[in-house]
């Protein structure tokens, strides 16, 4: 009889410790290919009709709070870090965090945390091993151009071709006009220079110089 009482006394504290301990189960790793992921935190505790706070932390030291939800199962109030796009869905024993628009530099380990605020006593979960969220760089492949999107391109090509052809015509016309005007200016000078010339140097005829005599001097 005494042995049974001792066993019972040793059993009740273990039950109380088990009830005050909340365990959480997370996926060890999630790979993100399209910049969004769902992280589910499964607890060994029923959140129905309880006042609680469920949050998600980033980093090995849980230094950055990503987002959190406060209140009860019927009226949860959400708060989100401005650097994340996060929404929260609460179930009876599961809290799911929907993360969107993730970047490569947000690859890290994430921890779920649950705090039961009411009814007392205050209970929170033991820290789990966390979930590594690996955000892969998204490479966008160029989409093939549809025929409708290529129409403006061909229209621009045709317009440029017409403009180039028109500029060539104008250039050729101006060149012809300039050549004709130059030819017309050269024709009168050609007629003036067609007078016959004697070949070789021409001789000049000089009259012999004869000094004039003063006949009045002889008369005197």
Image (cartoon, helix red, strand yellow):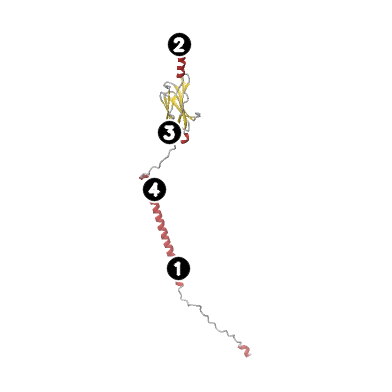
Q: Is residue 217 visible?
A: yes
Q: Nearer the viewer, mark 4 or mark 3?
A: 3
Disc 4 element: helix
The residue that appears at 46% across and 17% down in the rendered structure is: 14
Residue 188 percent location from the top left of the image: 45, 70
Choose mark 1 or mark 2, whichever is in front.
2
Residue at figure coordinates x 45%, y 71% from the top left: 190
Between disc 2 and disc 3, the foreground one is: 2
Spatial CA span between label 1 and label 2: 140 Å
Mark 1: which secondary structure?
A: helix
Which label sits in the foreground, 1 or 3? Answer: 3
User: Mark 2: which secondary structure?
Assistant: helix
Q: Earlier in the sequence, mark 1 or mark 2?
A: 2
The disc at residue 31 is 3
Above-or-below relation of 197 to 68: below
Task: Identify which residue, 71 or 30, lies in the foreground.
Answer: 30
Disc assigned to residue 3 = 2
């Amino acid at each position: 009889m005494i042995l049974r009482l001792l066993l019972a006394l040793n059993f009740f504290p273990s039950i109380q410790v088990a009830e005050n301990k909340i365990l959480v189960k997370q996926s060890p790793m999630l790979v993100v290919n399209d910049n969004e992921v769902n992280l589910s935190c499964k607890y060994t505790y029923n959140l129905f009709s309880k006042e609680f706070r469920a949050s998600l932390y980033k980093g090995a030291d849980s230094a950055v709070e990503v987002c959190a939800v406060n209140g009860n199962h019927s009226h949860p109030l959400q708060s989100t870090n401005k650097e994340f796009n996060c929404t929260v869905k609460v179930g009876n024993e599961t809290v799911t965090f929907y993360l969107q628009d993730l970047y490569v530099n947000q690859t890290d380990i994430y921890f779920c945390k649950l705090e039961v605020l009411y009814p007392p006593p205050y209970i929170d979960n033991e820290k789990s091993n966390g979930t590594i969220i690996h955000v892969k760089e998204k490479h966008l492949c160029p989409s093939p151009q549809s025929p409708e999107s290529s129409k403006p391109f061909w229209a621009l090509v045709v317009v440029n071709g017409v403009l180039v052809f028109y500029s060539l015509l104008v250039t050729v016309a101006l060149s012809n006009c300039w050549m004709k005007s130059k030819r017309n200016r050269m024709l009168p000078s050609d007629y003036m220079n067609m007078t016959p010339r004697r070949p070789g140097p021409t001789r000049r005829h000089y009259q012999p110089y004869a000094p004039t005599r003063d006949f009045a001097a002889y008369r005197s």
